[in-house]
Image: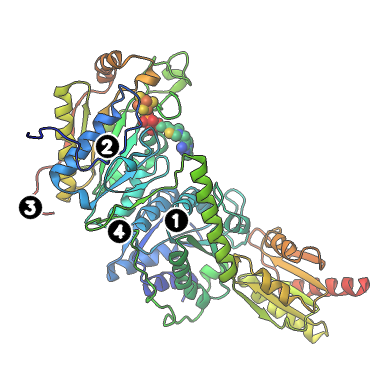
């Protein structure tokens, strides 16, 4: 199944019945899939007039307690930032899918990872965080739809799946059995019918500065809790690795092949793949580089995640960056060459 | 003693935050009376917008959400689609609805989204201190059209009911005023009709209410009422622009 379509089927399996979106390449197969499938399962699919409208529809539907999904690609995600900020401020859960393409501006339609900053550092205005998940296969893409909804509900916060155009377009076998719809929690805060309860109100407006600060502190505490409990990462041959390659999403798979090649040439290399981009798996990365002499960050961007890697390692290890952009992907050979370079450099230091 | 006049159930005890002579308060009361009369307080959701009425979720005793500037019709769409048994209304100013949220209102109307819009046209940005609005009249002075709105420089005012009336979608469009008791009664009828049509599932209803902003018009409340009659009503004629036929029974 195509990655984009797998997201749609996974959303149905996860109990989501509301989708609001606007077409954009390379994610249009997802809205198209749901436009076809939702009527069969009693879901509501609505093509909005813009991404701005779509995310605000999501905001309204989320307020009723519904599991609600929207998806787009980079330029459209920029337009959604206003609504994401409001949802974060009002603590309304929802799932946003960004199947990234290259930028800035209209950029291109080919895969990229250049929205890392936007996704993990807030994106819109105000002090807030979005939970960001980065799948590396179509199976994981599907599984993360369930995980994303669950985390969004658990923390009453927007969650995002950050994939790239390759992942959205590629075909892989996928099994939906693991996506439990069981976790749809009761939402006593939902608006709609207030019979027999106090009225529910959702706002992000706090005109009194003391009140807003209290709200900011409350949100910050929530983010701390998420950072403590929800980091995820995957490691490959890091235990004895002198060179640790850090990459997320599909790029990590390329790096795995490069690491295998390096090992066959006698360089002990490994791969560390952050699965949650926010919260960034800091503890896990620090552990994974215990035996390392150097770190290589590989991205399909001009260098974004590498900043979090450097922040995490606090200068304890040299961190080199290798990136391709604009829809170009790093090749196994190129990553291998980089591993070799940093390996030599680090030996030199010794 | 018989109580003949009291606060509608659909209004909280919260004091209005509006200036003396402002018509937002009258319009709130009318909406609340209609909610009471239709017995829908338990399933109504107010979608507040951004303008002087931004905190009206504190005034309406219903469920409520606060939407981003201009986006109330989209947020209301989300609420209504996910909770079709709710009665959903937006309450929006002219800046919110006819500038920032132009796309959202046109498309909600075109989809004939089953929601009600209370559109308060005071020809100015009240909340931010009296800047030019999309409905500011030609010649009208505001802080950002200090020489008077010149259509060559600042463009022309937008007549929202007429604009939306070009669409097949909407079920109900009416422009009313609340500058005197007779018109207040008419305005209430229009608001009631708008909510009733939603209850019956007829689709998109919008009531545009011409409204005074004495503070930013720099007029006394009394002179503001005259200005509504003489100037606003001349450019924005009152009346029903669209009325879908009654349907039988269906809710
Ligand atoms: C995105 C964004 N831009 C600008 C503003 C500032 N702003 C707040 S209210 C407003 C205009 C409100 O005017 P109107 O909708 O006519 O309501 P009124 O106060 O007149 O009732 C503006 C521009 C904002 N809150 N958000
Ligand atoms: S500024 Fe104008 S619209 Fe706002 S409350 Fe005062 S009179 Fe009313
Ligand atoms: Mg106004």
Where is residue A309 shown, x and y percent of the image? 72, 65
**Please, what secondary structure does the residue beneath circle 2 have?**
strand
Q: Is residue B162 visible?
A: no
Most foreground residue, A7 or A294:
A294
Residue assigned mark 1: A91
Residue drawn at x 33%, y 69% as measured from the top left: A37
Do dots 1 and 2 share one subunit? no
**Residue B118 image label:** 2
Q: Is residue A309 visible?
A: yes
Q: Is residue A9 left or right of residue A129?
A: left
**Please, what secondary structure does the residue beneath circle 4 have?**
helix
**Please, what secondary structure does the residue beneath circle 3 have?**
loop
Q: Give above or below for A223 relative to A291.
A: above
Where is residue A10 shown, x and y percent of the image? 42, 73
Do dots 2 and 3 share one subunit? yes
Residue drawn at x 36%, y 53% as measured from the top left: A60
Do dots 3 and 1 share one subunit? no
């Amino acid at each position: 199944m195509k990655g984009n379509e797998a997201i749609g089927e996974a959303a149905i399996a996860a109990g989501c019945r509301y989708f609001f979106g606007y077409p954009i390449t390379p994610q249009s197969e997802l809205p198209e899939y749901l436009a076809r499938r939702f009527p069969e399962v009693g879901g509501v699919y609505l093509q909005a007039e813009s991404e701005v409208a779509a995310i605000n529809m999501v905001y309204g539907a989320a307020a009723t307690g519904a599991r609600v999904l929207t998806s787009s690609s980079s330029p459209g995600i920029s337009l959604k930032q206003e609504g994401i900020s409001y949802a974060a401020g009002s603590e309304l859960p929802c799932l946003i899918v960004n199947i990234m393409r290259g930028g800035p501006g209209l950029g291109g339609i080919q895969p990229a990872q250049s929205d890392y900053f936007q996704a993990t550092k807030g994106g819109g205005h105000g002090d807030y965080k979005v939970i960001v998940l980065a799948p590396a296969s179509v199976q994981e893409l599907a599984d993360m739809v369930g995980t994303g909804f669950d985390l969004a509900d658990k923390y009453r916060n927007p969650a995002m799946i950050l994939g790239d155009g390759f992942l959205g377009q590629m075909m892989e076998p996928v099994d939906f059995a693991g996506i439990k719809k069981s976790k749809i929690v009761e939402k006593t805060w939902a608006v709609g019918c207030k019979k027999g309860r106090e009225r529910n109100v959702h706002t992000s407006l706090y005109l009194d500065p003391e009140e807003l600060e209290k709200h900011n502190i409350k949100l910050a505490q929530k983010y701390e809790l998420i950072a403590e409990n929800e980091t995820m990462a995957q490691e490959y041959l890091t235990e004895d690795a002198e060179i640790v390659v850090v990459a997320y999403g599909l790029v990590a798979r390329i790096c795995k092949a490069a690491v295998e090649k390096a090992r066959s040439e006698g360089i002990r290399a490994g791969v560390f793949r952050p699965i949650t981009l926010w919260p960034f798996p800091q503890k896990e990365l620090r552990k994974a580089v215990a035996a390392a002499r150097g770190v290589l960050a590989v991205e399909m961007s001009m260098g974004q995640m590498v900043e979090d890697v450097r922040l995490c390692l606090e200068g304890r290890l040299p961190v080199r960056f290798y990136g391709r952009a604009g829809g170009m992907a790093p090749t196994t050979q190129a990553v291998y060459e980089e591993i070799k370079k940093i390996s030599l450099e680090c030996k030199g230091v010794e | 003693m018989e109580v003949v006049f009291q606060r509608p159930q659909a209004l909280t005890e919260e004091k209005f935050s509006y200036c003396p002579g402002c018509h937002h308060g009258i319009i709130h009361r009318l909406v609340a009376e209609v909610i009471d009369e239709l017995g829908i307080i338990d399933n109504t959701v107010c979608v507040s917008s951004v303008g002087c009425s931004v905190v009206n979720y504190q005034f309406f005793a219903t469920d409520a959400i606060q939407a981003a500037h201009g986006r109330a019709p989209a947020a209301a769409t989300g609420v209504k689609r996910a909770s079709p048994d709710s009665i959903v209304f937006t309450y929006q100013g002219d800046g919110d609805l006819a500038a920032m949220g132009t796309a959202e209102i046109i498309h909600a109307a075109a989809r004939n989204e089953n929601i009600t819009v209370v559109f308060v046209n005071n020809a100015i940005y009240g909340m931010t201190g009296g800047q030019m609005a999309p409905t500011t009249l030609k010649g009208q002075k505001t802080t950002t059209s200090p020489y008077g709105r010149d259509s060559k420089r600042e463009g022309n005012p937008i007549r929202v009911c007429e604009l939306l009336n070009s669409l097949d979608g909407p079920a109900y469009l009416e422009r009313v005023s609340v500058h005197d008791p007779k018109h207040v009664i008419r305005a209430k009828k229009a608001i009631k009709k708008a909510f009733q049509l939603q209850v019956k599932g007829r689709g998109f209803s919008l009531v545009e209410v011409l409204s005074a902003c004495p503070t930013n018009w720099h007029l006394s409340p009394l002179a503001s009422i005259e200005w509504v009659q003489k100037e606003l009503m001349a450019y924005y004629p009152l009346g029903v622009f669209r009325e879908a036929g009654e349907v039988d029974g269906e809710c």
